[in-house]
């Protein structure tokens, strides 16, 4: 069942990505010969309004084949007003960007649905108070529920952390204990910590850890829109930063995952709850959007880079350079895919 869910989710994400390219291409009058979910041999095909819509045997991606554009033939040129290569560079950039943009829109829609259906958060309930910490000295105890800090209402543990880190001076905590709300004044201290990339940082802390308790918050339509926007932007920044840390060597290459890791995450989420499945689908959708914008030849970002060069230099890159860079891009992508699969296998059997 997990494999089926993985294939459905992946095909769903690929469909939206390619639909973005397709709609933008058709808007500018470009003929789209093929819209494919998967690669390789066709297992289903239907011709509709000049486009062959198909499902192929290998379901690990997809593509739209436009007149005048073919990644297997980087230097392809086809004449006619309905050809991709005859469009202005800015129009080609819009067509290229439309795929990743569709992934961001899909993620926002999924986050919006999650917010309406009930988003899960870590409860603002204290699970442990470190001895001799500011919280300990102020009298906070395990099982205290933080309901307010100064004049700000607190609903989730994440809000507690953000408020402390971005604050200055002493803080007044209002906690519920045995059904009664009591107030405690706490002076945070600067302490050593680690961020999500395991880098050593310093930040304001009070010495408390959360209780592993989940709360579900249902948002109204307006709040759900804000939640969807914030989560999409936050996820995008996290992935961009992750790629940057990987390039810098801060995140080891052993952290790269492949299709096996993605499949396991989706399978685990589907067994947990439908909301969890929507959340991981949204995150993977953002991931696809971000990674496709990287300036690697053969990806959308690489093609956008070529078109930006054409706008700035007022000429296209030579066919030889374009072909060599595209081949190099495919080598990079292939190497990353193999590394991901190697890491997946190593995690299972290592």
Image: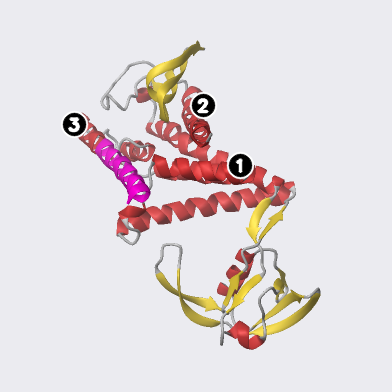
Q: Give the range drawn in magenta.
A: 329-350
Helix, strand or loop status at disc 1: helix
Which numbered marker is on residue 110?
A: 1
Judge from the rendering whether residue 18 lies leftward or rightward of residue 275; answer left or right.
left
On the image, numbered disc 3 is attached to which residue? 320
Residue drawn at x 63%, y 45% is 275
Quarter location, residue 120: bottom right
Q: Which of marks 3 and 1 is in front?
A: 1
Pointer 2 or 3: first along the chain: 2
Considering only order in the chain, which callout, 1 or 3, is on the residue closer to the N terminus? 1
Label 2 neighbourhood size at 10 Å, few (<14), some (14-19), many (20+)?
some
Q: How far apart are marks 3 and 1 (CA)?
A: 42 Å
Instruction: Give the class, few, some or many, for how many residues have Cα within 10 Å of label 1's Cα (few <14, many ≥20).
Output: many
- The residue sitting at 38% across, 53% down in the picture is 243
**Residue 286 visible:** no
- Residue at the image point whose x is 70% and y is 64% from the top: 155
């Amino acid at each position: 069942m997990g494999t089926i869910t993985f294939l459905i989710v992946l095909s769903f994400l690929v469909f939206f990505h390619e639909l973005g390219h397709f709609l933008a291409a058709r808007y500018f009058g470009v003929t789209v010969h093929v819209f494919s979910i998967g690669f390789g041999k066709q297992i289903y095909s239907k011709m509709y309004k000049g486009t062959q819509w198909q499902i192929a045997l290998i379901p690990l991606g997809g593509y739209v084949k436009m007149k005048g554009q073919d990644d297997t033939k980087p230097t392809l040129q086809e004449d006619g007003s309905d050809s991709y290569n005859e469009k202005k560079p800015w129009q080609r950039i819009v067509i290229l960007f439309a795929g990743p943009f569709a992934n961001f829109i899909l993620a926002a829609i999924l986050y919006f649905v999650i917010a309406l259906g009930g988003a899960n958060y870590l409860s603002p309930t204290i699970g442990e108070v470190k001895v001799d910490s500011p919280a300990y000295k102020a009298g906070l105890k395990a099982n205290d529920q933080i309901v307010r800090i100064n004049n700000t209402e607190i609903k989730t543990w994440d809000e507690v952390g953000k408020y402390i880190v971005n604050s200055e001076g002493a803080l007044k905590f209002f906690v519920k204990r045995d059904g009664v709300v009591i107030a405690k004044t706490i002076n945070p201290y600067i302490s050593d910590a680690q961020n999500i990339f395991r880098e050593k940082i310093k930040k304001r802390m009070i010495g408390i850890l959360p209780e592993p308790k989940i709360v579900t918050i249902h948002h109204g339509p307006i709040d759900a829109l804000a939640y969807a926007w914030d989560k999409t932007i936050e996820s995008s920044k996290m992935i961009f930063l992750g790629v940057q840390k990987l390039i810098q060597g801060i995140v080891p290459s052993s952290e790269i995952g492949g299709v096996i890791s993605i499949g396991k995450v989706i399978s685990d989420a589907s067994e947990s709850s439908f909301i969890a499945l929507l959340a991981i689908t949204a995150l993977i959708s953002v991931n696809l959007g971000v990674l496709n914008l990287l300036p690697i030849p053969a990806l959308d970002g690489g093609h956008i880079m070529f078109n930006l060069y054409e706008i700035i230099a007022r000429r296209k890159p030579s066919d030889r350079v374009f072909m060599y860079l595209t081949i190099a891009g495919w080598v990079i992508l292939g190497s990353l895919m193999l590394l991901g699969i190697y890491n997946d296998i190593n995690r299972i059997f290592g």
